[in-house]
Amino acid sequence: LPEGTYTFSVRAKNVHGTLSEEGSYSFSILPPWYRSWWAYLFYVLLILAGVYGLLRWRVQQLSQRTLELEETVRQRTREVEKQKDRLQEQAERLEELDQVKSRFFTNISHEFRTPLTVIKGMVEQIEKSPHKFLAKGLKMIKSNNANLLDLVNQILDLRKLESGTLQLDLVQANIIYYLRYIVESFRSMAENKNIELHFLSEHRTLVMD
């Protein structure tokens, strides 16, 4: 029988056909255990626990995702800062390179003036007195021509400067010899202007960088 409350009614009949009074018996059929009230209560509690567990798992997932996103943002921020530092460093390097190039061209321009001036002066002296100044003048012209070629080579080395592969050529030499050479280079020009030009030094040798 389905669960519920039932009443069983009965009447007896004797051999003479006489009916007795009706008797009744009431009883109840209980539902199976899985349909009882405490089973439904268990189901509700189980559903609530499942929902709570699902929500907690979802919150943990979102928290973990948030931490991952925060770490990604921090990494991207660090990368952007590093890139900014690299760009700043490159900008500073380009500015420094531009200044070096400007100083380089300025120095080279001044360096060109010396041999060109000497060559010009010797040519003028040779034109005036070829027998007197030809031998000395040709020697000095060749020497200053070599200096000009060296300066041209330095200009060609400017590409190395831009690529950062140009190396310093550190030299120690006798500065007395170098100063004497510079003075002698201008002697012809001085003579053209009737100027006596001499170089006097208390030291024969002074080695320096």
Image (cartoon, rainbow, N blue to C red):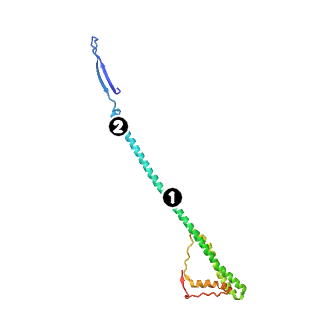
Q: Which residue is mark 1?
A: 80
42 above or below 78? above
Picture quarter containing residue 42? top left
Residue contact at pointers 1 and 2, CB within 8 angstroms: no
Residue at image position (44%, 48%) is 62
Along the line of sight, the residue nearer the viewer: 166 or 7: 166
Compared across the picture, whether 49 is left or right of 13 comes to right
Residue 184 is at least partly visible in this image: yes
SS of the residue under disc 1 = helix
Along the line of sight, the residue nearer the viewer: 161 or 104: 104
Residue reaching furthest to the top: 16
Q: Mark 1 and mark 2: span between their CA atoms?
A: 56 Å
Quadrant for the C terminus in the image:
bottom right
Question: Which kind of residue does numbered mark 2 sit on?
Answer: Phe
Q: Position of residue 193 (x, y in %)?
A: 68, 85
58 above or below 36? below
